[in-house]
Image (spheres, helix red, strand yellow):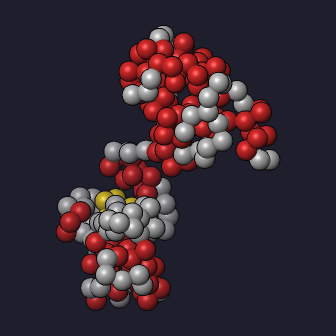
Amino acid sequence: MGRDDIQDRFDWPRAIRDERKRRHLARPEVAHRSGLSLSAIKAYETGARHPSREALQAIIDALGLTAAEASPILAGAGYATNWRAIFHDAYGPRPLEWFEEQVEHEAWPAFVTNEASDIIAANRTFRTLIGMPPSQRLPTPEKWNFIAMSTQPWWADHIDNWDEAMSWALGLAKTGLRRQINLERPPPWSTGSNC
């Protein structure tokens, strides 16, 4: 299925018009919110013109659509769906208590880290493994870093596949798999080399 097939199956101009009306917004208001001209909004809604991705995204933002609501409009207009935004909307930022509850249900040692590899939640099995009382609160993240702890002998003695775990953790930090890297502004751990 190609771009033309998708466009033929979904009437994206009608969708943006219907979403505007459903939200009780007039075209001038959408034009003002999006920074586009009134004539452009009318041309896009009637299908007389095809918007750039940036213009279509500006309309989507002006309408206040969620990523899931915007997905068929973007796809219908021939643009890639923003899956990251869809997942963020569905599973986005959670309170610390949510993570603590999730890992507690795991039988094996389980923990959650942030982007800096600071451990922010850990289950009882993991705490027992490293000698921390299960009821004790975790230290502040900056004092409980997975990579820093992994280099300590008291920690390494508890891990059978320490070399593999360290290779994985360092590879993750060096390549920045948790986020897309802007090559013009790389994260600090990947500057200076492309190893």
| Residue 97 image position (x, y, % from top left) | 34, 47
State whether residue 182 is above or below residue 56.
Answer: below
Residue at 80% x, 47% y is 1
Residue 169, can we see it?
no
Residue 127, quarter of picture: bottom left
| Residue 82 image position (x, y, % from top left) | 54, 46
State whether residue 49 is above or below residue 3.
Answer: above
State whether residue 70 is above or below residue 139.
Answer: above
Residue 140 left/right relative to 110:
left
Residue 69 left/right relative to 158:
right
| Residue 115 image position (x, y, % from top left) | 34, 63
Residue 176 left/right relative to 15:
left
Question: Quick one: 55 or 144, which is closer to the camera?
Answer: 55
How many marks overall? 0
State whether residue 121 is above or below residue 147.
Answer: above
Residue at 36% x, 83% y is 193
Residue 142, can we see it?
yes
Residue at 20% x, 66% y is 142
Residue 52 left/right relative to 93:
right
| Residue 36 image position (x, y, % from top left) | 44, 27
Quarter holding the C terminus? bottom left
Residue 132, quarter of picture: bottom left
Residue at 43% x, 14% y is 28
